[in-house]
Image (spheres, rainbow, N blue to C red):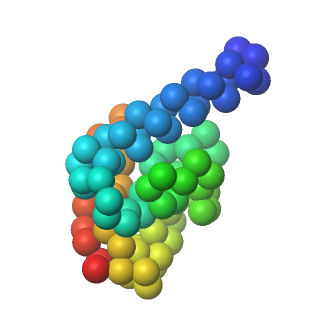
Amino acid sequence: MKTEELKKEIKKEVVTVVEKAKDFTGIGGKVQIVEPHDRGWAVRPRGADIPTSVHETKDEAVTRAKELATKQSLELVVFDQEGKVQFRHNYA
């Protein structure tokens, strides 16, 4: 697969996960997301294209996302490898 095709495919998957997060949490609320990434697990705010951080393990990503969500009074949504919501908690 060519680099540009791979980028399009990754972006398409990210958009799908973002849309699932919006459907699950409602539009408008501030949400920190943990999701699969090509280099491990990404932490990012909903609506951001670029992750805040990428971690080798899901546990590391969740720990960091919890820190951010707690500090910023956000909701945390954690997705599994298939893009389904695995965990949700509101730290507001």
Q: Is residue 9 above or below residue 88?
A: above
Residue 7 at x, y percent in the picture = 67, 29
Residue 75 visible to the viewer = yes
Q: Quadrant of the C terminus?
A: bottom left
Residue 65, quarter of the rendered image:
bottom left
**From the viewer's perspective, is residue 71 above or below residue 57?**
below
Residue that appears at 32% across and 68% down: 75
Q: Residue at x 48, y 31 (%)?
A: 13
Which residue occupies the foreground of this view, 57 or 26? 26
Residue at the top extreme, as displayed: 1
Residue 85 seen in render? no
Q: Is residue 8 left or right of residue 60?
A: right
Image position, residue 45 (x, y; %): 48, 61
Is 44 on the left or on the right of 8, as rendered? left
At x 58%, y 48%, the residue is: 49
**Screen quadrant of the N terminus:** top right
Residues 65 and 56: in front is 65
